[in-house]
Image: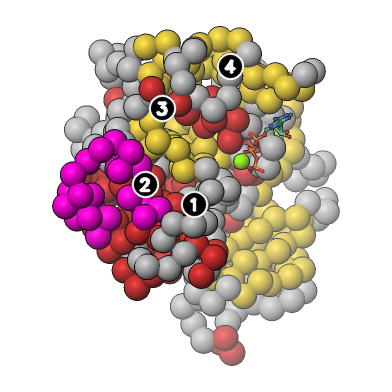
């Protein structure tokens, strides 16, 4: 599987479609993008994730040609994009604040780019119908933008940006205003469009689940820099930093001191307790301050001390969050450290084993945790 899966970033002979080369963007003294270098390959679904203000939209606007680059270079298909205006780039962008033409109907909005290209009318009509169907807007074709809802307007903007079947499509929070069900359906539509047309997508999203669902690779950003780029599974299972581990999903962080031991590290975190052990190929040297990161779903919770587990700690249940299919137990260890453990709710509520104030054991395997630089 691994060899045949889509992963051009692992192929040294593959040439990237998009290259950011030491790109810096300054607004006055403020550095919005900080010496960023990144390749994106044709037919990728590349997701940018990061807190508000970290520079996601700025990256997209520079790529689309709506913003100049202060230093460095952006190449598309090997061509330097400096001084190439937006309409001369093989790029289409759906903006975060999607500006629809208020005096045009929904159909006319979607047709706009195609008309400007001088396509024949029957071809335009067929394409617009297809886009209306795709985004489930058939009923609203004749209305004006102010006569439809916010989520519907967002779908019009998406339909308009897809209508021209661009080779490279930049989507800035394209599904933000949609409800969960429609959002998931549209995610699958986008993936389908990509498979059928070979479009390369760069998408900004605030929704981690969305990034994990659609992306070939996820870039996690902070303050104008990309902290890690990896497949969704690697971002989740092998974050390169506390920042990324903490940003994606829920995680327990135990700060301690790592000493090399066998196939990994022993981590001491509190006086009078046995060290925790983690297998790892991460290299922190012989001895270093560290952060141990463990996902709550990898932590087991039991009444008796498990005999076999590599890591066991004792604690008391402080809080239980009932999530329907799962419960998250908030457990305080003897040193005051809080940990979360998640367990599937396979039994009915009244037969559950644990409640508040119970003494419990938490345990996890030696491969469940990763050791990160503190
Ligand atoms: N024209 C501008 N002049 C000055 N500063 C700007 C300008 N445009 C953006 N910035 C700043 O650059 C930083 C990055 O902005 P950007 O819009 O790229 O953030 P973002 O990651 O898209 O955030 P959000 O998730 O909120 O959309 C922000 O701190 C923003 O205030
Ligand atoms: Mg933005």
The secondary structure type at the circle numbered 3 is helix
Q: Examine the rendered structure and indicate whether residue 229 appears above or below residue 245.
A: above
Label 3 crowding class (10 Å Cα cut-off): few <14, some 14-19, many 20+?
Answer: few
Residue pictured at 33% horizontal, 17% vertical? 77
Q: CA distance from mark 1 to mark 3?
A: 18 Å
Residue pictured at 52% horizontal, 32% vertical? 60
Which mark, residue 69? 4
Q: Check disc 3 and report the residue beneath it.
A: 87
Residue pictured at 45% horizontal, 32% vertical? 230
Please state the quadrant of the image where ligand 1 appears.
top right
Quadrant location of the N terminus? Answer: top left
Residue 363 is drawn in which quadrant? bottom right
Label 4 near label 1: C-beta < 8 Å?
no
Closer to the chain start, of discs 2 and 3, is 3
Report whether residue 140 is seen.
yes
Label 4 crowding class (10 Å Cα cut-off): few <14, some 14-19, many 20+?
Answer: many
Q: CA distance from mark 1 to mark 4?
A: 29 Å
The secondary structure type at the circle numbered 1 is loop
Magenta span: 108-129
Residue 147 is left or right of residue 243, and the answer is left
Circle 4 or circle 2, nearest the eye: 2
Q: Residue 17, percent across and down?
A: 34, 22
Which mark, residue 112? 2
Q: Check disc 1 and report the residue beneath it.
A: 101
The secondary structure type at the circle numbered 2 is helix
Q: 359 or 238, which lies in front?
A: 238
Q: Is mark 4 within 8 Å of ligand 1?
A: no
Closer to the chain start, of discs 4 and 3, is 4
Circle 2 or circle 3, nearest the eye: 2
């Amino acid at each position: 599987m691994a060899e045949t899966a889509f992963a051009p970033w692992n192929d040294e002979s593959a040439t990237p479609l998009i290259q950011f080369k030491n790109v810096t963007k300054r607004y006055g003294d403020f550095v919005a993008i900080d010496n960023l270098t990144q390749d994106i390959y044709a037919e990728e679904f590349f997701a940018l994730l990061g807190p508000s203000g970290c520079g996601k939209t700025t990256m997209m606007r520079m790529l689309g040609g709506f913003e100049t680059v202060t230093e460095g270079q952006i190449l598309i298909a090997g061509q330097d994009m400096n001084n190439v205006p937006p309409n001369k780039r093989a790029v289409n962008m759906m903006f975060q604040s999607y500006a629809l033409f208020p005096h045009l109907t929904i159909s006319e909005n979607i047709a706009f780019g195609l008309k400007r290209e001088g396509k024949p009318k029957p071809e335009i009509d067929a394409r617009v119908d297809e886009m209306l169907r795709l985004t489930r807007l058939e009923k609203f074709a004749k209305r004006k933008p102010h006569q439809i809802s916010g989520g519907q307007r967002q779908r019009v903007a998406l339909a308009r940006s897809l209508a021209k079947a661009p080779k490279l499509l930049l989507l800035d929070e394209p599904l933000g205003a949609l409800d969960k069900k429609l959002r998931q359906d549209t995610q699958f539509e986008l993936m389908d469009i990509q498979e059928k047309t070979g479009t390369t997508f760069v998408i900004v999203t605030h929704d981690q689940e969305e990034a994990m669902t659609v992306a070939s690779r996820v870039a996690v950003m902070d303050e104008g820099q990309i902290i890690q780029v990896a497949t969704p599974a690697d971002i989740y299972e092998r974050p390169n930093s506390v920042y990324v581990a903490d940003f994606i999903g829920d995680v327990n962080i135990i700060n301690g001191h790592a000493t090399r031991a066998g196939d990994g590290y022993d981590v001491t975190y509190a006086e009078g307790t046995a060290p925790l052990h983690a297998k790892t190929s991460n290299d922190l040297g012989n001895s270093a301050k560290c952060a141990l990161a463990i996902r709550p779903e990898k932590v087991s919770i039991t009444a008796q001390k498990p005999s076999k587990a590599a890591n066991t700690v004792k604690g008391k249940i402080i809080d239980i969050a009932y999530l329907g299919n799962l419960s998250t137990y908030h457990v305080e260890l003897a040193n005051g450290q809080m940990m979360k453990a998640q367990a599937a709710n396979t039994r009915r509520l009244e037969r559950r084993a644990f409640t508040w104030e119970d003494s419990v054991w938490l345990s996890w395997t030696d491969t469940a945790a990763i050791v990160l630089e503190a």
